[in-house]
Image (cartoon, grey):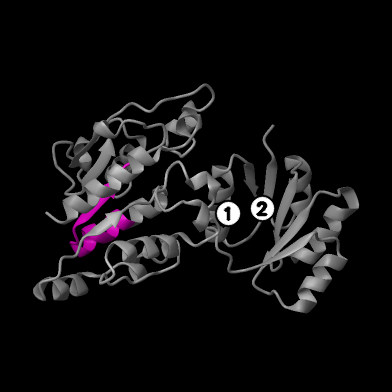
Amino acid sequence: MKYRIFIVEDDETIANLLKKHLSSWGYDVFLAEDFSNILQEFAGKDPQLVLLDLKLPFYNGFHWCEEIRKVSQVPVIFISSAADNMNMVMAMSRGADDFIAKPFDMDVLVASNVNRQLPALDDNFGKSKIDAMAERIRQINPLVRLHLIDDFLTTDNVTALLPHRSTYHQLKQAGKRVVILDCVDDMAAKLAIALHCRFNKIPLIMSGGAGGKTDPLAITVSDLKDTYQDPLLAKVRQKLRQQHHINRDLAEKFGIKCVYSTQPPIVSRGTAQTCQTGGLHCGGYGSAVTVTSVVAMVMVAQALQ
């Protein structure tokens, strides 16, 4: 049985990030659509948990918590940046079970990362991924210079997080090598990175999906045009051609170097749909560190060429 989680959050970026992370743990996650009639949506979804924002269109979270409590005792957890003591007390008095303050960090190392991420060790559980990786890199090379940004790349902040054409040329003239390594598995973020690098003429190396892949010897490098057996890269290619009219001539290369596995995804019963998007649960177990680590090493090797 899959547990159902109902998220009532009007910020689409936060709502989709929550959905993505909770779905990766195997939960059925539903997002509120009609903020004027949350109770009806709640009844239709019949969730085992409600994540409820405080500030919402039409009626605030206090109102909807009271309405839910009239018909159900399902756990309700508030998620809000308005995390002062008064709001917490009011939330509890209206029947909430807990209150989580924004911003919250969902990108920490947990046990489910062990099979697919090298920094995921017992001593690192609960630690931010970028902090764990920075510590590992400094142990390898204490002289390395790192600039850490603890944030998710989205279509809204891609231009703020990645360098622009002028910065790229300044660094290049100073003898610096600038290459963007795209290691994300979110389609919207992957597409935003590709478009930004193309517009600003910055070299890009893109990773493929690792879901359902087990053989590191099947990892190869090619232009995005020539990738195969990788549903994630196929989706990127399709969107660039159809939605952004880039390289619609099928013979033309994209100029995006991709590191990916040509192994057909291993599909378990009931996971075929997940494998169509290259998701982590493709194959029923996610991805393997024997593949993800090799992809990373090959990407770095390509960047240094």
Residue 259, label in figure: none
The residue singled out by tag 1 in the image is 18
The quadrant of the picture occupied by the N terminus is top right
Magenta run includes residue 283:
no
Q: Is residue 46 left or right of residue 67?
A: left
Q: Indicate the secondary structure of the residue bearing disc 1.
A: helix
Magenta run includes residue 197:
yes
Residue at 32%, 34% in the rendered image: 230
Quadrant of residue 166 in the image? bottom left
Can the viewer see residue 248? no
Q: Is residue 168 left or right of residue 4?
A: left
Q: Is residue 288 left or right of residue 21?
A: left
The quadrant of the picture occupied by the C terminus is bottom left
Q: Residues within 10 Å of mark 2 (few under 14, many from 20)?
A: many
Residue at 48%, 47% in the rendered image: 113
Disc 1 versus disc 2: distance between alpha carbons?
A: 8 Å
Q: Mark 1: which amino acid? A: Leu
User: Bounds of the magenta span?
Assistant: 193-208
Residue 210 place in picture, x, y as percent: 37, 38
Q: Indicate the secondary structure of the residue bearing disc 2.
A: strand
Can the viewer see residue 151? yes
Residue 265 place in picture, x, y as percent: 38, 28
Look at the numbered discs 1 and 2 and tell me whether their residues touch, using CB distance below 8 Å: yes
Q: Mark 2: which amino acid? A: Ile
Residue 7, label in figure: 2
